[in-house]
Image (tube, rainbow, N blue to C red):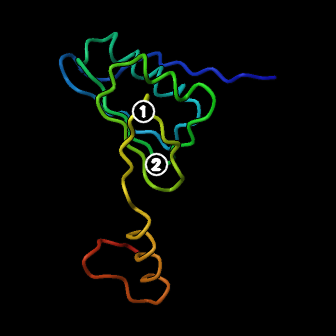
Amino acid sequence: MLRALTCASEIVGDVRGRVPVIVDDMISTAGTIHAAAKALLATGCGPSVVVTATDGLFGGPALERPGALPLTRRMVADTLSTPPTSALPIQVVRIASPVAEAICGLQSGKPDDKRAIDG
């Protein structure tokens, strides 16, 4: 079985004393988040890290890895069901309704004027 490994080799910019926000498209094993957070912490960010992702799959080691890091906030969109666990508190940001409304508006040719949608 092939195993993918993730590493972060460089941080661009000065993060010392700042709280970084890691943005990822999906959290499947949390390897990217773990590597990025460790690299940020090694360069002096902190004392905490915020993580956000569109899709939270949370398979395999994804439930344990973030527990070893000083993550103060974990957020995912409601694109997938999130496994309930007290060891990994996750804020689920509800985006399904606004996305559905935007799609319906675009399909009907009447996008909502309140949203900035370029067609």
Type of the residue with mark 1: Ser
- In this view, the residue in front, 119 or 98, is 98
Q: Please give the name of the residue rendered at 40% of the width and 15% of the height, measured from the top-left corner.
A: 39
Of callouts 1 and 2, the N-terminal one:
2
Residue depicted at x 46% and y 28%: 33
Q: Quadrant of the N terminus?
A: top right
> Is residue 48 left or right of 101 when viewed as pictured?
left
- Helix, strand or loop at mark 1: loop
Check the image and report above or below for 56 versus 4: below
Decide: few, some or many residues near mark 1? Use Cα within 10 Å; few <14, some 14-19, many ≥20.
few
Residue type at mark 2 is Thr
Q: Which residue is mark 2?
A: 54
- Give the labeled residue for mark 1: 86
Left or right: residue 3 versus residue 32 is right
Residue depicted at x 23% and y 17%: 47
In the image, is residue 13 above or below residue 51? above
Label 2: which secondary element = strand
Give the x, y percent position of residue 111: 37, 83
- Residue 38, image x, y percentages: 41, 15
Q: Position of residue 68 (x, y in %)?
A: 42, 16
Q: Is residue 111 above or below residue 52?
A: below
Q: How busy is the neighbourhood of tag 2: few (under 14 within 10 Å), some, or many (20 plus)?
A: some
Residue at 37% x, 73% y: name it: 118
Which is nearer the eye, 13 or 76? Answer: 76
Cα–Cα span, label 1 and label 2: 21 Å
